[in-house]
Structures are given as structure tokens and as C-alpha cells.
Image (spheres, helix red, strand yellow):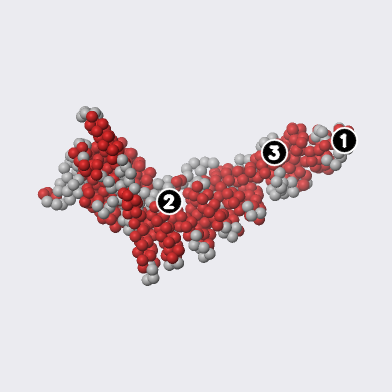
Amino acid sequence: SMSSGGGHDSAPSDVVATASGWIALLQEPEPALKSHALNKLLECVDTLWHEVAESLPDLEAISEDLDLPLPMRQTAAAVASRVFFHLEEPSQALRLALEAGEQHFDPQTKTPYVESLITAALDAYIQERKRLLQDEDPIKEGGGANSGKASGTNEIGISMEQLQGMVYRLLDACCEEGRYDHALGIALEAQETDKLNGILMASGPDTKLLKYALNASIKVVSSKSFRQEALAVIAECLSKQLGTGKVASVDLIIVYQLLGKADSVAEVLGTLLKGSEEDALLGFQLCFDLVDSGDQAFATKVADVLKSMATEEHPDRWSQVARVLTGGFSSELALSFLHKQSHADRLIMENLKKSLEERGSGGRSSLLHNSAVMTHAYLYAGTTNDSFLRDYLDWMKKASNWAKFSATASLGVIHAGHITEAMHLLQPYLPANPGEGDGGGAVSPSGGYAEGGSLYALGLIHGSHSGSSAEKRKETADFLRTHLRASHANEVISHGAALGVGLTSMGSAELAIVNELKEVLDTDSAVAGEAAGIAIGMVLVGTGAGSPHNSLPSQGKEEIMELVLELKNYARETQHEKIIRGIAIGLALMQYQQEENA
């Protein structure tokens, strides 16, 4: 074999065409010979690993033999680690590489061997972190059974300390080289809040990096509890940047809203409104964005805090902000835009109506008639243009029973957001005011389809745009609640009123409203109960009611928690499938955006 080398003595791998000689030396009892053989094997293992693979058990035995000197054990581990790497067993290779120590395995060198082990280490670490976090969380069931083996070592036998030490060194190295985004990705994957903070601070909070961190937290991080922690860290960094530039406030408001901190949002907006003309304009834009996010309850909280911050100077700014947040300004803008830009073709409806009439009257026509009325509602949704119905009132009145309910409610779709005229428009259909005239305006148990539909329409007009006027919405909610309380005898009116109350009190989490809806459920009527179940969900939307992680207001919190339990039990006991479905949707609405906390 010496002659085949052709004089290239300098490179041992050229000389050694077989490793069998060195492998044989491993069986010698003399440590010096073993040590020499191991060093030689380390030099040629990358080309002759297939031969060395057969003596893996010997190598592992040497690396674990505590009677042998440490450097020799580490060399044996290094050789075995490289063999496992070539056998495509990165996790085993990693275990041995960590035993071999830094002189044989330096994460800073960029070889395929090192890079594959680093990937394995990161994967193992992230998996371990997730398992530890699951074991810590007592709410997650099933974490108890396997937590016995979580005591510091994982499946492949690497201790968590070793892994953590290596990953932290990697993160520090990334930061020193200025590759903050790499480090940030690892910290987010492994759910390391402290590291996240360290990396962002080390970058001096860099604006681009913060943007990246924010996007990743919202889109990539799958655990809600860690996302909240990450967002709190990002918020801290962003607030430090506020002093230098106001642009940070755009992201800061997004973060605070995700964290549900109304007073912090108000503080940022207040600072902008007290600033220059440009700052104030940015503040207005952010108020519009806040309203467009659809969270009425949150926008109302922010508006309340801002009221108390208003100063004497620029009074117009403060009144304009109140108008945007709770005065219904964005709803008015949307309405006037839709009204002016409506290009719906009336001919479509004319032809549709004509062709349906040619079909003649028959059992099937009611279904077609109803679909035509719905088509009209979608064609003119939000444009307030109901001239076609006014011209063909007799045609519209053909609807009966639930089709009549839908036809009346479709007015709410056409006039969505048209709150100034709502009462005037629906006056002909609304039920008589309770407590007026003969016998307290008693509701007849049959019929009531137009009345129920009109109450639902009121809810659609006031509740379908999150930016509608808070004051008007409250007035309508009170009006609908009056009818809800009086309507128990008629399930159709109850159905419409309950949906209307849900839409107008969306997200308010008011105990009194929830209790009134619960009373409708207690009548055990399938039709009314379904609507009440959904409506309770709308009133408590996104609060997480019923789970320990909730954002319910402290007033009435316990009663609401109790009530959610009752709902669950009621759904199990009732015979009505509609009620079960209504409660199921209601519970889903309460847990909206709660993710794993649900």
C-alpha cells in the first residue's frame, strides 16, 4: 500500500488505503497503542468510515471507559461521532461530538459535519424546550405520564445542560457576527424570552429586526402564551425607540392591541396628538386602523382613557379622535362611499323577477322568491338603495313564515351602517312597544316573522360595521333588549331580538345582557334558544370566558364563568339540536383568538 501513495507522504489519507491495521490495535490492552491508533483513525475516518463502522461498539466502549485518560476517551468519541455522521445518524453523532469536547468539535468551523450537527442540536433543543414547557403547564392533560423521563436527558441521551450550553454559544456567535435574524429565529422557535430580549437589545434595537420579530411573533409563533411574552419584549424595545422617531408608534400600537393594553395604546396616541401637525395626522390614521380592526370593546376602552388625557390646546384634535373611535365617523365614510359608488344593475333584478313570475305560482316558487330577495340584498348590500323593493312592495310581501323573516332582515343588509334612518325605515315592521295600550301590547304566540326580522335588521344596521356610533349602538341595544324581555311568548320575535342584541352588544361582556339572553335559553324553545346561544357568544366574543385565561371585566366575572358552565351542561341535557348548535357556536365565539388557552 505504501507504493500506491506515489510519494504523497504528507497526507495520511492518501497512504492508508485500509484502516484494518489501526482497528486491530484497538484490541490491544496497552493504552499508548490504543491512543496512537485512535489518532490515526481520526485522520482517515472521513474516507474509510465504512471500515471503522464495524468497530463502533469498541469505540463507544473506549469513550465510556472511565479508567482511560480523558483525551483518549474524547478522541474515541470524535471518531465514533464522525462515523455516525457518515451513516446519516446526526443525533447519535451529536451526542458523541458533545462528549468529544470543543477541540474536536468547534461550532465555528463551517464543514458539512459541523453544520449537520448544529442543525441536529437546534432541532433537539427546540423539541426539548417544547416538551419541558408542556410538562410545566398543568392544564395540558397527558403531560404527567411521560414527565418522569424529563429529568435532564432526552431520548438520544444528551443532557439538556449540554444542549443548552451549545445553543447559547451559537446564539452569542451569531450576534457577534451580526447575524441577528438567525439568532432571533432560534430564540423564537425555542421560546426563549430572555434570549429574545438579549438579541434585540444587542442589535441596539434595530428597526428592521424589530419588524421581523413582530411579524414572526404574529405569524410563526404557535403558542399564544409565549407570543404574549415575546410581544411584551418587542413592545419594550419599540417604546425605547419612540424618543428618536414617531414611526415606531405604528408597530407599538399593533403590539399593545395584541396584548390587550388599552391604556398603553391611549398613551401612545395621546403623545402623538400633543405633538406636531404631522404627529397628530399619524395619530388619526392609527385611530382609523384601530376601529377597522373590528374590536369595538377595545376601541371604546381606548377612547375612555383618551378622554381623561385631553388638554386645553388643540381641542379640535381631541374631539376628532373621539369621533373616529366611538362617534361612527369611519362608518359614515364607508356608507357614503358605498352609496355613491354603487354600480349594481337594476336590470338583473327586473329580469330575475320576471323569469320567476313566468314559472308560475307553485309550491316551489316560495323558495325561488326567497332566493331572489336574498340576491337583491347582496346586490345592494350597504348601499342604502332599496328603490327596487319600494317599487315592488307587493312582490316582496309574497314571502311568508321564515322567508318573511329573512326578507325583512334583508333590509338590514341593504342599509348596513345607515344608523340615522334605521328606526324610520323599519317602523312599519317593528313589533308594538311593550307596555303600550291594550293589555301591555301582548305578543301573540304565532306569527311575528316580519317583527322578528325587523329586530334582526336593526342589529345588522348597527352591528355590521365596527366603526358605527357607540351612542346609537347603545340606544338600539337598549331598545332591542326591551323587546327581548317582552318576547318570550313568541319564539320568532325572540330569535330576531336575540340576534340583534348580540350584534349591537358585540364584545361588551356585560353581565346584564348575558343574563337576559340566558333567560331566553331557559324558555327551552329551539328557535329562540339557538339565537340566544349564538348571541351570548357575540356579547362575550374573544374574552375567553369559561377558561382560566380570560379577559373578562372584574365586575361580574364569576357570574359569567358560572353561566358558561351552565351553558355547557345545558347543551348536554337539552333535546333540541338547534340549541346544542347555537351554544356550540357561542362557546366557539367566546374562545375566539384564545388558541391553546381554549
Q: Which residue is mark 1?
A: 6
User: The N terminus is located in which quarter?
Assistant: top right
Question: Could you tell me residue 419's position as x and y percent?
Answer: 27, 52
Q: Secondary structure at mark 3?
A: helix
Measuring 20% from the left and 37% from the top, which residue is drawn there?
Answer: 395
Report crowding for label 2: few under 14, some 14 to 19, many 20 or more residues within 10 A (C-alpha): few
Question: Could you tell me residue 423's position as x and y percent?
Answer: 22, 51
- Asked whether disc 3 touches disc 2, contact meaning CB atoms under 8 Å apart, the reply is no
Q: Secondary structure at mark 1?
A: loop
Q: Which residue is mark 2?
A: 549
Left or right? Give the position of 416 relative to 239: left
Total number of numbered discs in the rendering: 3
Q: Which residue is mark 3?
A: 85
Instruction: Give the amino acid type for the residue marked by disc 1 in the picture.
Output: Gly
In the rendered image, the vertical position of residue 539 relative to residue 79, given as above or below: below
Q: Quick check: can you spot residue 517?
A: no
Of 567 and 401, the residue lying toward us: 401
Question: Could you tell me residue 129's position as x and y percent?
Answer: 57, 47
Instruction: Give the amino acid type for the residue marked by disc 2 in the picture.
Output: His
Of 348 and 589, the residue lying toward us: 348
Instruction: Give the amino acid type for the residue marked by disc 3 in the picture.
Output: Phe
